[in-house]
Image (cartoon, rainbow, N blue to C red):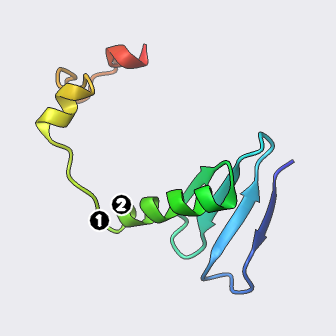
Amino acid sequence: MASATHDESPEEGVEFIHEDDGTITARDLETGVASFGETKTEALRMLAEALELHDGGGNPVTDEDLQEWGLDDVEPGSKELPAFMQ
């Protein structure tokens, strides 16, 4: 069963959830954004990246990115999975 610990303030801080599979989820209490890792350090590093993206950071996806990932021929609204997901 997963267990959680968090800071005193319910509005700020990070909650750590120790998952049954041994990973640790770090969740930002203010935004609800979460990420995970094998250790608290890794979970916090991944959470920092997720928060940056949540706040509008990072780079937009380009047509070249879609082509590299094999998603350039997926039609909007298509229910068929891309080849790499089948």
- Indicate the secondary structure of the residue bearing disc 1: loop
Rendering coords of residue 32 (x, y %): 55, 66
Q: Taking 20 as reference, is 68 left or right?
A: left
Rendering coords of residue 34 (x, y %): 56, 58
Q: Taking 80 as reference, is 75 left or right?
A: left
Mark 1 = which residue?
Answer: 56
- Indicate the secondary structure of the residue bearing disc 2: helix
Rendering coords of residue 64 (x, y %): 13, 34
Looking at the image, the residue that sits furthest to the bottom is 9
Residue 67 lies in quadrant: top left
Q: Amino acid under label 1? A: Gly
Looking at the image, the residue that sits furthest to the right is 1
Above or below for 40 versus 22: below
Determine the residue positioned at 32% across, 19% down. Answer: 82
Q: Amino acid under label 2? A: Leu
Q: Nearer the viewer, residue 46 or 17?
A: 46
Rendering coords of residue 85 (x, y %): 41, 19
Crowding near pointer 1: few (<14 within 10 Å), some, many (20+)? few
Q: Answer yes or no: do the residues labelled 2 and 1 have beta carbons within 8 Å?
A: yes
Mark 2 = which residue?
Answer: 53
Above or below for 39 versus 85: below
Crowding near pointer 2: few (<14 within 10 Å), some, many (20+)? few
